[in-house]
Image: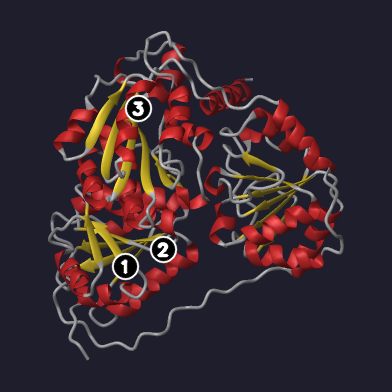
Amino acid sequence: MTTLTVSGRVAQVLSSYLTDVFGVMGNGNVYFLDAAEKLGLRFSPVRHEGAAIAAADAYYRASGRLAAGTTTYGPGYTNALTALAEAVQAQIPVVLVTGDAPSSGARPQDVDQAAIAAGLGAATFTVTRESAGSITRQAVEYALTKRTAVVIAIPYDLAALKAADEELPAPLAPTVTHDAGDLGQAARLLAGAKRPLILAGRGAHLAGAAPELRELADRLGALTAGTALALNLLQGEGYLGVAGGFGTDTAAGLMGEADVVLVAGASLSPFTMRFGHLLGPDSTVIQIDTALQPTHPRVDLFVSADVKSAAGRILRMLDCGPSGNAWRAEARRRLAEGPAHHPGADETTDGRLDPRTLATALDAVLPERRTVVQDGGHFLGWAPMYWRIPRPQDLVMVGTAYQTIGLGLASAVGAARAVEDGRTLVLASGDGGFLMGLSDLESLIGAASSAVVVIYNDAAYGAEVHQYGSQGLTEKPMLIPEVDFSGIARALGAKSAIIRSLADLSALRDWIDAGAKGTFVADCRITSSVRAPWLSEWMEASQAAKAAVAG
C-alpha cells in the first residue's frame, strides 16, 4: 500500500468525491495542496481566503457537484468565516480543509477554530494519524447528507506525518422515506382543488423533481411558480414566473387566489412569501421537503420526503385524468392584460442610466447560453426580473441567505470552473461589493474562459441610501467615490468599457461577436434615484412590524 501522509490521506479520500479545490496556500495546508496536486485534483488559486469557500460554494450551486475550499490556520481560517456562514445558512454542501493547532496543544497564536465554526453552525472534523481517511469520509458524508458546510481540520504537527493504513467503508447510499398516509391526504386535497398552485424551490431542483411536478401540474390544471433559486424549473403552460418580490403584481395576485398550494422543496422565506401577503388566508398549504418539520406557520399539511419520490407517489394516487384549463385560461388572460415589470426610463434626473432600462438592454446583448452569478446588494433583483435565465442552476444568488455583499467575485471563480460547456459566466455586482472582493478579479480573469462582469455602479451603497438616507440620516458613509473599474480591469488583463449610455454597450457586443473569450468588465454608471420594488416591499414590511410593536 502506498505510503501517505495525513494530508495525503485527506486528499486521497476527497478525490473520490470531488475534482476541484479553491484556496490560498499557507503553512497549515501546504502539504495538503501538494498531495492534492499529485492526485490530480485541480487547484484554482484565489487571492483572499474568504474566496476559497465562496468559490467552492458557487461551484456546487452551478453544477451540483461537491468542491473544497482550503486555507491555512489562524487568520487564513478566520478570513473565510463569512463565506462559511453563507454556505451554512444557504444549506450548501461544501468542505473547508484547513490547518489547525498542533495535536499537542494550542500555541499562543492559535484560536479555538472548532468553537468558532460551531458558532456559525458548521461541524468540525479533526483528523488523526490513525483515522485521517475515515474522519474525512465522515465529514464529506455529513456535508452531503445534511446539505451543509463542514470543516476538516488538519493539526499542524500531523500534516506531514505518515498516516496509518485504513480499511475505508463504502460511501453511504442515500435513503428516501415518506409517510404514505400524508401523501394520500395531499393527493386528495390536490384532486379536489379548483385553483391549484405548485410552488417549487431549490429542493425540487436538487431532487430532479421537475418532470414529476410538471406532469402533476398538467394533470391538475395547476398554475406553477418557482422561487428565485428554482427560476424556470416548471416553465410551461400555466407558469407564473418567480414568486415573491421579483415577480409581477399580476402573477402575485393569481397566486393569492389559489385554493390549494403544493410547496415542493421551498422553505417559504419572507421574500418568497412577500412578507405574508403572497398566499390567500383561506388557501390550504401542503409542503413537501426533506426537512423534519414545516418551515413556515402557513403550512397546513407537511410531508417530510424526497420531493421527486413523493410527487411520483401522488401522481400514481390520482384517479383523475387531465383537468380542465379554465384556471389556466384565466391566468393567461390576466397575465397578458396585466402590467409587466417597469421598463425603466430613457432619462433620469442625474443623467445616469436607469438600471431597469440597462438590464433590459443587457439581456438582449449577453449570450443566450449564460450562467449568472448574483452578488448581494440593492441591484440583486434586476437579473431575475429582466434577464432570461435558461435553467435553475444558471442563477447563482449568493449572499441572500446570510445577507452579505462582496462574495460575488469569489463566487464567480467557482461558477466559472463549474461551467465548461460553452456557456458564458455573467457576474452582476454592485460597486460596493465589487470593491470588497476586488482582489479576486484577478482570480476570475485567470479561471474563466468566457466571463462578463456587470457592475451596477451608482457610487454608493444603494440599499442604505434608499433605506436610511430617505429617512434623513446622513448619506456621507453611504457614498463611494466614483471608481474607474474599467481601468482596473484593463490593468489586470481584462477587456472593459465604461457604460454611460446604451450605445456604449456596443463595446460589449463587439467582444461577444468576436468570440467572447476571456473576461469583459462593463462599468455601468447607474442612477441612485430608482428604488427596486423588492426593497420597497421590504421597507414597508419593516415599517409595519415596527408600528405593530410600538402600538
State yes or no: discs 2 and 1 in contact (Cβ < 8 Å): yes
Residue 505 badge: 3
Q: Is residue 58 above or below residue 326?
A: below
Q: How many marks?
A: 3
Residue at 23% from the left image edge and 44% from the top image edge: 440
Instruction: Determine the CA span between mark 1 and mark 3.
Output: 37 Å
Query: Disc 2 on helix, strand or loop?
Result: loop
For mark 2, what is the residue? 65
Residue 238 badge: none
Observer able to see residue 421: yes
For mark 1, what is the residue? 19
Residue at 45% from the left image edge and 66% from the top image edge: 144
Instruction: Determine the CA span between mark 2 and mark 1.
Output: 9 Å
Q: Is residue 23 above or below residue 317?
A: above
Observer able to see residue 398: no
Q: Quadrant of the N terminus?
A: bottom left
Give whichever of discs 1 and 3 has the lower sequence position.
Answer: 1
Q: Residue 405's quadrant in the figure?
A: top left
Q: Residue 104's quadrant in the figure?
A: bottom left
Disc 1 marks a residue whose amino acid type is: Thr
Q: Nearer the viewer, mark 3 or mark 2?
A: 3
Disc 3 marks a residue whose amino acid type is: Leu
Q: Nearer the viewer, mark 1 or mark 3?
A: 3
Give whichever of 209, 295 is nearer the camera: 209
